[in-house]
Amino acid sequence: MKILIAGAAGRLGRALADPLEQRWQVVSLARDELDITSESAVRAALDSHQPELVINAAAFTDVDGAESRPEAAREANALGPRNLARETLRREAALLSFSTDYVFDGAKKTAYDENDAPAPLSVYGESKLAGEEEIRRHNPRHFIVRTAWLYDNRGESFARRAIELAANHAEVRIVDDQRGSPTFVPHLAAAVARLAATDAFGTHHIAGSGGCSRLEFAGELYGRLGISTRLVAAKTADFPAAARRPSNSELTTSRQRAIELPPWREGVAEFASRARD
């Protein structure tokens, strides 16, 4: 199988290359090589490379920035996936694209599965949900992978910010009223490689198994890294932001042939091991 990765220079795009290249021929295109918001660029790339599967790792991910730049968020997160869905359909290729826990409003008291109705609180969440809908509308041979709270040892993430704060402060305040599913990116990339080998089309929740609060996540991280900086519980309202966050966006799956990740604490353990190397 030949796979084309769009958004290959981003954190997720880079992580996907290794497990996919172990099995298949992979073409990795960064944004300057393939702008998914351009129909003609998508058409030209697919004509040139003739992939059997396109993986869309391109996105507008600035949650707060989307509130003041809604058109930019929609172009990247909804129109781009629409272009990919249309062009892959024309070539009888499959499309795998990533979505987010932020399509939910957080009102549910337990974890969200694939059957729960989305109700995004933010422009970012709305744009990602619109992208899902475009994909479903235009190419039935699709995988939509909802994931959450991504982090790894490269690039910006909540985990890396928490470590930086510990290095510069005697105590660190972290919210305890946001709950989700921390997802170690290399674990997600390996799961996507497994999913790509199937015909299990549709929507999948793939995130670190189990859930925790931001404060619990930081506590596990500090413990694994031997960080003694004091953690203090705070509330979301203590840190005003442009976009609303769901108070609970923990993900689980109801699919019979689910591709599940290890417990979220195992992701933290691997992150910490790599950070010490």
Image (cartoon, grey):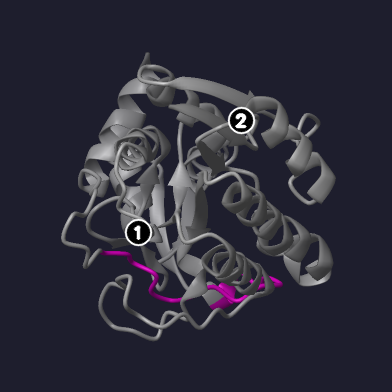
From the viewer's perspective, is residue 225 above or below residue 140? above
Which residue is found at the position 49% from the left and 24% from the top?
17
Amino acid type for the residue under numbered disc 1? His
Crowding near the residue tagged with mark 2, few <14, some 14–19, many ≥20 C-alpha atoms within 10 Å: some
From the viewer's perspective, is residue 26 above or below residue 205? above
| Front tag of 1 and 2 | 2
Residue 65 in view here: no
Would residue 164 be found to the left or right of residue 72 on screen? left
Quadrant location of the C terminus in the rendered image = top left
User: Where does label 2 land, which residue?
Assistant: 50
User: Where does label 1 land, which residue?
Assistant: 204
Circle 1 sits in a helix, a strand or a loop, which is it? strand
- Give yes or no for residue 243 being in the magenta stretch: yes
Q: Nearer the viewer, residue 135 or 47?
A: 47
Which residue is found at the position 66% from the left and 49% from the top?
87
Quadrant location of the N terminus in the rendered image = top left
Which residue is found at the position 60% from the left and 76% from the top?
244
From the viewer's perspective, is residue 72 above or below residue 186? below
Which residues are the magenta region? Answer: 237-252
- Give yes or no for residue 254 being in the magenta stretch: no
Amino acid type for the residue under numbered disc 2? Gln
Would residue 65 be found to the left or right of residue 52 on screen? right
The percent coordinates of residue 160 (x first, y second) are 51, 38
Would residue 191 be found to the left or right of residue 136 on screen? left
